[in-house]
Image (cartoon, rainbow, N blue to C red):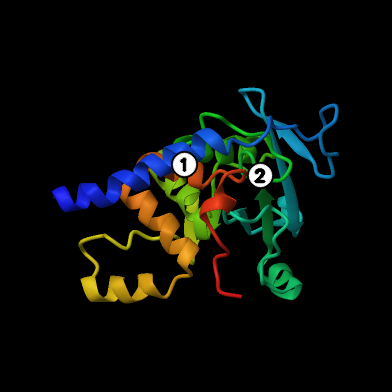
Amino acid sequence: MPHKLVFVLPIVLLGWAIQAILRPPPTKLCGSPGGPPLTSPRIKLRDGRYLAYREDGVQKDKARFKIITVHAFDSTKDFPLPVSKELVEELGIYLLAFDRAGYGESDPNPDRDVKSEALDIEELADQLELGQKFYVLGTSMGGYSVWGCLQYIPHRLSGAALVVPIINYWWPSFPAELSRQAFKKLVVPEQRTLWLAHHVPSLALPVDDPEVAPFFCGCHAPP
């Protein structure tokens, strides 16, 4: 245990120092004076924040499946899903993508957590009149938003899917050797990110902040 503390403590102190020194400049909200221009439709949430979204697929009133997609940490609502237009039309799929808080054209949420992301999704669905139930699909880091939906608004879900989600490589139910091999196949920046999130949970949220994350994280796949 003492040896572990000697190893972990400097990393914790370094993380706190990075947060204190490398704070990003004040955020310029999209559409505000001096801020980036707006190019997407947005809804106004109960707390006053704006959430940007994009609609694809068939019309809502003709859809058999209404799916809200949640993008990865280094992405936005504009990341295209690898699904053909023909298949979307054949199955009658309506797709609703949105920029998570602080990403793209959505306002940041200083109090963002797993529950707040689930509630953002629920309010988006209500304001766009998707009905009582809908599907959610999360990619990579977007998987934790889907987990939040399963945890906090399960009564609103017709189904949920996770695509290459971030997992807990230290979960005791996984075979230890399999977890170790899978972890080693990740790019080094992502290994660093997950190691910090596991051993120093207080840094987990800053790591997923789109303005701070580039220091800690690399791309999700090797070049």
Q: Residue at x 41, y 43 (%)?
A: 14
Q: Are marks 1 and 2 in contact (CB under 8 Å)?
A: no
Q: Name the foreground residue: 30 vs 138.
A: 30
Using the numbered discs, state the Cα–Cα distance from disc 1 to disc 2 in whole angstroms. Answer: 14 Å
Q: Name the foreground residue: 76 vs 52.
A: 76
Give the x, y percent position of residue 12.
35, 43
- Identify residue for label 1: 205
Res 186 quadrant in image: bottom left
Q: Name the foreground residue: 122 vs 164.
A: 164
Q: Residue at x 33, y 45 (%)?
A: 10
On screen, residue 94 versus residue 142, left or right, reads right
Q: Is residue 196 above or below residue 181?
A: above
| Nearest-to-viewer mark from 1 and 2 | 1
Give the x, y percent position of residue 155.
44, 42
- Identify residue for label 2: 103
Q: Is residue 84 above or below residue 200?
A: below
Identify which amino acid the numbered label 1 is placed on.
Answer: Leu
Q: Which mark is residue 139?
A: none
Identify which amino acid the numbered label 2 is placed on.
Answer: Tyr
Give the x, y percent position of residue 89.
73, 68
Q: Count of labels shown?
A: 2
Callout 1 crowding tier (Cα within 10 Å): few <14, some 14–19, many ≥20: some
